[in-house]
Image: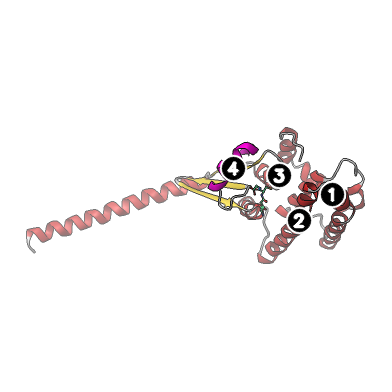
């Protein structure tokens, strides 16, 4: 082999080794960073579509930044969000930053990270089913609230849906909506009761299983702590 060929082969070997070493280093970095991702949760200074996610984050025990956007700052931030809406969860893992929009997608991701998901595909489908139904109920609340028509809503749509959920809790028979453990659907249902008007303190008495679930969720120490310390907001 000519000397020049030897040099080329040596250079190639060294280059491959350098690349391998770099990859190994990066993989190690990723492994360590994956252990501790950081979370920044961005929403307005209200409960609405953000609060059940704050409940989930509190339940998990991870530190998270509760980033509350003032109305006057929103228009400049809006174009930088995935869909021009909040909430958005930012997950930083080493050099990788991922933003998730859509409240239920955020909930599902966090649930899978922190054991609030189903044990199998079927349970996850049921949890998603409840999430979607509660999302619809929530949308009805948001639009009724915008039109000052919540009175009607709390006399019709909400009682009808709470009866659905009560019946499903009866059917599952163990205090949870799905399977045999707490899921993000249970937390979502509990947090929804934040929106019941003060004028209807008896509302939950008609749904004893939901009332009991709500009390259990709110007395989980980390969620109870969150509720004690959270900012007081009108909505
Ligand atoms: N389906 C979305 C709805 C998000 C949504 O409607 N966000 C509202 C606040 S609750 C918003 O960002 N409004 C401001 C805007 O659209 O400019 C979700 O569940 O995250």
* 105 relative to 215 in the view: left or right: left
**Mark nearer the viewer, 2 or 1:** 1
Q: Main secondary structure of the magenta part?
A: helix
* Residue 197 part of the magenta segment: no
Look at the numbered disc 4 and give the secondary structure of its residue: helix
Give the residue at x 33% y 50%. 22
**Mark nearer the viewer, 4 or 2:** 4
Q: Position of residue 164 (x, y in %)?
A: 84, 60
* 69 relative to 25 in the view: left or right: right
Q: Name the foreground residue: 6 vs 138.
A: 138
The residue that disc 4 covers is 75
Disc with the residue nearer the chain's start (3 vs 1): 3
Q: Name the foreground residue: 153 vs 180.
A: 153
Give the residue at x 90% y 41%. 199
Look at the numbered disc 1 and give the secondary structure of its residue: loop
Provide the residue span drawn in magenta: 65-80
Residue 134 badge: 2
Disc with the residue nearer the chain's start (2 vs 1): 2
């Amino acid at each position: 082999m000519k000397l020049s060929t030897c040099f080329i082969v040596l250079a190639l070997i060294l280059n491959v080794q350098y690349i391998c070493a770099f990859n190994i280093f990066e993989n190690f970095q990723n492994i360590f960073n994956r252990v501790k991702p950081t979370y920044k949760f961005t929403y307005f200074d209200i409960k609405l579509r953000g609060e059940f996610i704050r409940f989930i984050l509190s339940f998990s025990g991870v530190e998270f930044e509760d980033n509350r956007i003032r109305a006057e700052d929103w228009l400049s931030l809006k174009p930088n969000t995935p869909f021009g809406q909040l909430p958005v969860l930012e997950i930083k893992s080493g050099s990788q930053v991922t933003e998730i929009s859509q409240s239920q997608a955020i909930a599902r991701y966090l649930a899978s990270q922190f054991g609030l998901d189903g044990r199998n595909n079927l349970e996850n489908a049921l949890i998603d089913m409840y999430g979607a139904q509660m999302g619809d109920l929530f949308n009805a609340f948001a639009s009724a609230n915008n039109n000052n028509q919540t009175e009607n809503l709390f006399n019709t749509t909400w009682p009808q849906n709470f009866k659905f959920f009560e019946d499903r809790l009866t059917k599952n028979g163990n205090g949870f909506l799905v399977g045999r453990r707490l899921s993000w659907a249970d937390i979502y249902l509990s947090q929804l009761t934040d929106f019941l008007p003060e004028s209807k303190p008896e509302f939950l008495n008609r749904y004893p299983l939901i009332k009991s679930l709500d009390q259990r969720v709110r007395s989980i120490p980390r969620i109870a702590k969150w509720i004690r310390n959270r900012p007081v907001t009108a909505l």
